[in-house]
Image (cartoon, grey):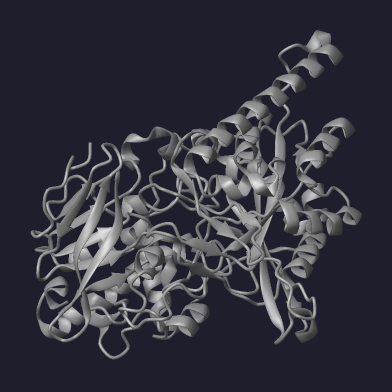
Amino acid sequence: MPRLSSLQALEAYDLIVVGSGNGACGYLHHALRADPAARVLVLEEGSNFFETSDITHQRNWTQSYAEAEIFQLHCAQTAAGLPILSGRACTMGGGGSINYTMIFESPAWLDQHFGHGCDYWQARQQELAEALAVLDPLVRRTPVACHVQDHLRRHGFHANRHQAGRIPVFQADGDDRFHCFPTQFDAFGQRVHSGVSLLSWYDNPQLDLLTDHRVTRLLLEPDAAGQQRCVALAVLDRRSGALQILPLGPRCRLLLCAGAVTPQLLLEHRERLANPAIGRDLNDHILLPFGIYLLPPDLEPTGRDQYVDLFATTELELSSAEAGGEPYRSVGNLDVFSGSLPVLLYLVSHLFLAFWLPNPVKTQMIRHRWLFQALKRLTRLLVMVINRLLDLLWCLRHPRRLGRHRWPLIAAIVKFSIHRPGRYEPGPAPGRDTVLLRCFEADREGVRPDALLAERFMARLLPLVASLGRRPHPWIEALIRLFTRMPYTPEQIPGFVAHYSRHDLLTEQHLAGGCLLGQALDPGHGDPADCGRLQGSSNIYVADLSAAPLPRVSPQMTAYLIGYHLAYQHGLAGQRSARPPLARL
C-alpha cells in the first residue's frame, strides 16, 4: 500500500513533487541522498506501480494497454482540426512496460540545448547508468533478437558502440545504426530496472507517496520580491472525487514532473508570470506502422520479444526547398515487435482506434474519457472476433491439425519527430487545454516535410522489415490493409502516407517541450540553485521532458537524465553554501 492513504496538510514538507515519472525518479535519486534531512511528498495521479502486476510484468503489458486505465488520451489535434491519437501512461517511473527502450541522447545534443559541455553530460550519463544497474544487453539474446540483428546487418546497419555503462548513447554520424538496449525485465518478466528502481519507495523516512491523487490547479500569489509563489495546490482524490485546497509551507518548493500535464498546469498563469514561453515548442514522434509478417517456422518468440530489445536508426536530410526553409536533418527510428497472434492483436487493438474510427468520432473520443474507454472495449471485442474467425478458418482448412497453429508474428513501427513544433492552446478550463501538433502541415508553397520524410523513411526500411518474415495469406493481408492501409510494397507507400496524414494520425506518446530550459525555465548558468526554476516564480521548478526539445531517439533515458541534472545542479548549490541543497533552495 502507499505510505499515505489520504492527505490533510502540506506544510510539513520541504519539497512536493507532482508526478512520479522519469524526471521525478532521476531527481529524487540524487536529491534525497544529497540532503538526508529533507522531507518530500510525491503526488501521483496513477495507481500504485508496485501493486499493478499488469504493468510490472512484461508478459501482460500488451493487455494492460488494451484493458487498463493507465493510458489516457490528450485532446490533441492538428492546426486544421484533424484529431491525433496522442496519449500518456499514468504510472510511476514514467510510462508503462511498452516504453522501455533505453538509450541516451548524445552529449553533444545535450550540450547544445542545455550547456555545461560534453564531458559534464558523459559523466552524468555514466552515473545514472550505474545507478540503474541494468543487465548487459548482449548476454541474453533471444533467437528472434538474433534473427532481427542478422537482417539489420545484411541491410547495411552497423552496431552502435557508444555506451554509458551498458546503455547505448545515440551519436548522429550519418550511418545506419542498430542499438542493443538493456531490458528492464528480469528472467521472471518483472520490471526491476526502470526508473522506479532508482528509489526505495517504502523504507525511506524522507519520502511520502500518495497515489490516485491528481493536482488540478496551482494557486499563486506575489511574494515580497514581486515574484509569483505557489502557495497552495488543488488536489483531487480520484477514488472519492473529493477536491481539497491545501496550502504549502513558507519554505516549500514545488517540483513539476507531470510530463505533458506540467505545461497545462502552468498555462493559465502565463501572463501573471510574464513568461510567454510556457506552452510553446511542443513536439512528439509521429508513429507509422509497418505490415504484420509471419516469422520463419523455426523461430519461437519469447515474452521478451514482445518488444525486441534492439532498434535501428537511419538519417535523412531534406533540402531547403523540400523543408520549406533551411535544410533539415531527421532521424527515423525502427522498433520491432514479435509474438503470437493473440499477443500482437492486443497491441494492435490499442492502436486500432486510429484506423477504424472516422475523424468526427475520434474528435469526440479525445475530448471525453468515457467515450475513449467505451470505444477501446469495443475495439478489443472486434479484435477478439477477428481472432476467433481466423481460428475457425484455420480449423476448416486444416481439420487434422486442430489446436496446433500459433501464428508467430513480427511487426515494426517507424517514428520520427514532427518537423514544425506545436504548442498548447488554452482550453475552457484548467487541464482541458488542446495539444496542437503540426504534423504533416503544409506551408504556403504546399511543402509538406513530414510527408516527404515518412515516404523516404518507409521506402528505406520496408525491404528490411519485409525480410524479417513472410507476408500473410492474401486474404489476411487484404484485411490488414482494409483497416490500416499499411504498405507491403513500395508502390503502396505514397497512398498509405497520404491516407494516414488525413485519417489515421498517431503519435508515439513522447510529448516533449512546453517549458524549455533557457526559455520558460532558468538554465541555472548564473546560480545552479536556479536550474529548472520557472521564470517569474520563486518556488516552482520543472524536471521532466517538458523542459527539453524532443530527443531524436526514444526519450526515456534523456528524461531521467534531465531530472538527475537538476538535482546535481541543486546539490552543487548546497555544497557551495555549506548548507543542504533543499535548505539552500
Q: Quadrant of residue 272?
A: bottom left
The quadrant in which the C terminus is found is bottom left
Q: Which residue sits at x=70%, y=70%?
A: 441
Name the residue: 89% across, 34% down. Answer: 474
Relative to 250, is 411 on the left or the right? right
Is residue 417 among what the camera can see?
A: yes
The residue lying furthest to the bottom in this view is 526
Q: Nearer the viewer, residue 362 or 313?
A: 362
Residue toward you, 159 or 92 = 92
- Residue 487 screen position, x and y as percent: 82, 49
x and y, in percent, of residue 231 in the image? 17, 67
Q: Is residue 474 above or below residue 562?
A: above
On the image, which quarter does residue 186 sit in?
top left
Q: Residue furthest right?
A: 491
Is the residue 208 above or below the residue 125 in the image? above
Q: Is residue 88 above or below residue 119?
A: above
In the rendered image, is residue 127 in sight?
no
Residue 550, x across and y down, in percent: 53, 70
Residue depicted at x 38% and y 45%: 192
Q: Position of residue 443 (x, y in %)?
A: 73, 78
